[in-house]
Amino acid sequence: MTTTDVQEEPQARSGPTSRREVLQAMSGLMVGMFVSILASTVVANALPRIITDLHGSQTVYTWIVTAELLAMTATVPLWGKMADLYSKKLLIQLSLSLFVAGSLIAGFTPNVEILIVSRVVQGVGAGGMTALAMVVMAAMIPPRELGRYAGIFGAVFGVGTVAGPLIGGVLVDTSWLGWRWCFLIGVPFTLVAIVLLQRTLNLPVVRKEVKVDYLGAFLITLGVSLVLVWSSLAGHQFAWASWWTVALAGGGLVVLALAIRVESRAAEPIIPLYLFKNRTVTLSIVASTLVGVALFGGTVFLSQYFQVALGKSPTVAGLMSLPLIFGLLISSTVAGQLITKWGRWKGILVAGGVIMLAGMGLLSTIDGRTSTLVLSVYMAVLGVGVGMLMQNLVLAAQNDVPAQDLGTATSALTFFRSMGGAVGVSALGAVLAGRITSLMAEKLGPLGSGASGASGDAVPDISTLPAPVVRVIQDVYATATADLFLIGVPLTALALVAVLFIKEKPLNTLSGDERLARENAVVGH
């Protein structure tokens, strides 16, 4: 059996105890969480301008988003596992330092190739922050009280996810700033987060005399990467039914199968397979994955719809996303407070699933003439549903696993949610590009679409095109975007089904550190 050495005095406190101390410790976490999530979305409204300035394509458009999500997704399990073995405080500061490095590289990038590399570095850092923030919270706060704080974090996560396009749009439209500040703006806030964490976060350091399963981590990363590369390029760079699909998708599945074999034999696996025997964890993972597809896959391309299909400026496009922000912010905060007050969470999850499904269905009906008011209502509905569902799935899983597995269980949910987001962006981006190409050829003909630059591979600059062509392009982008949300409807329905089968259990009244100490005491006897 693995031995555990907790580096603290027997009578020392394991962490913050009062609400004030908890809030102080969370201040740095919230700032770090906000900027790391912001990195995933702040480029959304800036991408058309970035692609134009750096001479990129529609495929590059998708990959600037996907590269960061891919790196974040692939490294989350490793960060989570290390949180169970090493200093959580040190790991968070390391992840934020990597984020700063990636942001600086992106801000001064001379071309799209280096930009994509910088997004990978950002993603590794963001993966650490998103995985570790909820782990640290669970260590400090009992599940019975966690709803209140999880609601705050859910709001921060949601605001960072959806406010990014607004911030990016304003920066792009400000002549003395420009799109490069979409990457540089997070640097000072990240440095502030590092300082705050150094001063306020005090947790016991738990060291276990084990080796991290780096082979399993490598195989998981490689397998996920191959699948994501395939989902990003299939249907556009090559046919879905082609030898490229066999090589990339098939190869990815083979590598993931090998990773499962390695994980089943490892002393300290990155993602312990026994976690999937827990019904709550498994169903929460399924729902989180599908929520990731809905949140990232749908909202990333809304910005392009606003700018191309509706002809809005980046700033206006960002303002148009506010209903989604407010819906998510309010529902996440209120849901967390209600869970803490009532001690029950299943009804909140089910209601969130139903509302999210309704939001996806409503957004699948948009076109180039949908009014701003109607769009706002539809986006608010989606935001309310996602806000009620997202962080509370993590809470349900954390409440149902041993304290020694809090890090791996939390990172597993974060991993699969990010995986859903990355697959959603890449696969739906490929579907969007293919749909645009076919619609352009249908409405303008091969020569007409090529002359206008309005193909699926090139994001058109509608300000330089004649009015009749602009109208066709706007209809095409509106139709293609609505189709993405239509694809999301059955996926969201599956998330609701998974939530319905989760069994509600009473929320624990002990923090993760207290539960771990009790578990270790039982093992010691």
Image (cartoon, helix red, strand yellow):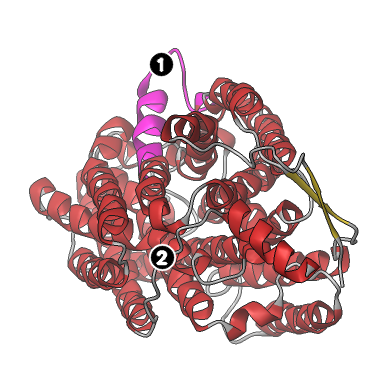
Question: Pointers 1 and 2 in contact (CB under 8 A)?
Answer: no
Q: Earlier in the sequence, mark 1 or mark 2?
A: 1
Along the line of sight, the residue nearer the viewer: 290 or 231? 290
Q: Position of residue 499 (x, y in %)?
A: 36, 78
The residue positioned 81% from the left and 84% from the top of the image is 261
Q: Which residue is identified by label 2?
A: 507
The quarter of the image holding the N terminus is bottom right
Q: Is residue 493 magenta?
A: no
Along the line of sight, the residue nearer the viewer: 487 or 514? 514
Q: Which residue is identified by label 1?
A: 175
Q: Which residues are magenta?
A: 162-181
For disc 1, the neighbor class at 10 Å (few under 14, some 14 to 19, many from 20) is few
Q: Quadrant of residue 252?
A: bottom right
Please give left or right for residue 258 compared with residue 64 in the image.
right
Question: In this rendering, does residue 406 appear at all?
Answer: yes
Please give left or right for residue 419 compared with residue 364 in the image.
right
In the rendering, which numbered label is found on residue 366?
none
Whether residue 215 is situated above or below residue 241 in the rendered picture: above
For disc 2, the neighbor class at 10 Å (few under 14, some 14 to 19, many from 20) is many
> What secondary structure is the magenta-colored segment mainly?
helix
Q: Which SS class for mark 2?
A: loop
